[in-house]
Amino acid sequence: MTELTFRHATAEDIPAVVDLVQSAYRGDRSRAGWTTEADLVEGQRIEDSMLVDLLERPRTIVLLAQTDQLVGCCELSAEHDPDIAYFGMFAVRPELQGAGIGDQILRAAQQTAIDLWGATTMRLVTIHLRNEVIAWYERRGFTPTGATHRFPYGDERYGRPKRDDLTLVEFQKPFPPTTR
C-alpha cells in the first residue's frame, strides 16, 4: 500500500487541487478511474475562485494526500454543527484509484475532523445515480440519512448536467467512540 503524508492545502496548492479534482470527476481523463461523472455532468467540477472561498471559510480545510506528488484530497468542514463534519470534494488521481488511497484519505479525514472539531459524525452527498460510489461509501459504514438535495442546476461553477433528473443524496457515518 502506498504510504501517504497529509497536510492542509494553502493558496499555493489551488492549481494542483483544481487539476486533481477535475481529473477525477470530469472529462476524458476521469474515465481512467471509476469515480468519473463524465456521463452525467460536463465542464468544471470546481474553479479556482471556489477553492479560494473554501480555504477562507472558518472551520473548513482541504486535506491533501501526497507521496512525492499530490495523489488525493478532500474537503472537511464543521461550519454548521460542531458534531458533524462534512466530507466533500473527495478525489484520487484516476490512474491510482483502486489502490487503497481513498481508504487512507477517508481514515485521515475522519481523524482530522475528530482532532480539530471533536466531530462525532461524518456526512456527505453524492449524485443518486452513482451506484459504485454509493456502494463504496456503504462498505465503509455510511448509511443514507433520507435527505436529498437538488443538484445545483444553472450554476456552471459545478458543471453542466447532461441530464435533468440529478439529485444529491446524503449519507452519514457515526464515528466509533474509541476514535473520539
Image (spheres, grey):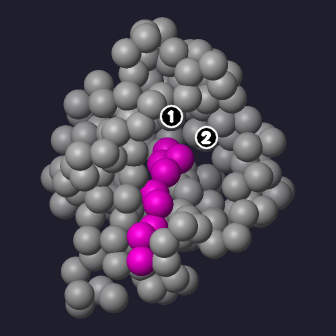
Residue 113 belongs to magenta span: no
Quarter of the image where one finds residue 29: top right
Q: Is residue 173 visible?
A: yes
Q: Residue at x 44, y 24 (%)?
A: 37
Expressed as whole percent of the image width and height from the top left, the position of residue 25 reads 50, 30
Expressed as whole percent of the image width and height from the top left, the position of residue 75 reads 56, 57
Q: Residue at x 37, y 59 (%)?
A: 123
Residue 85 belongs to magenta span: yes
- Density class for disc 1 (Cα within 10 Å; few <14, some 14-19, many ≥20) is many
Q: What residue did someone put label 2 on? A: 20
Q: Residue at x 42, y 77 (%)?
A: 83
Q: Is residue 65 visible?
A: no
Give the residue type at disc 2.
Leu
Q: Which mark is residue 154?
A: none
Say whether residue 124 is left or right of residue 47: left
Give, as a single range, the part of the protein colored magenta: 83-91
- Secondary structure beneath disc 2? helix
- Density class for disc 2 (Cα within 10 Å; few <14, some 14-19, many ≥20) is many
Say whether residue 47 is left or right of residue 72: right
Q: What residue did someone put label 1 on? A: 24
Expressed as whole percent of the image width and height from the top left, the position of residue 92 reads 47, 45
Label 2 – label 1 distance at C-alpha: 6 Å
Q: Residue at x 51, y 82 (%)?
A: 117
Location of the C terminus by quadrant is bottom left
Callouts 2 and 1 close, C-beta under 8 Å: yes
Query: Does 56 sit above or below residue 81?
Result: above
- Secondary structure beneath disc 1? helix
In the image, 119 versus 149, the foreground residue is: 149
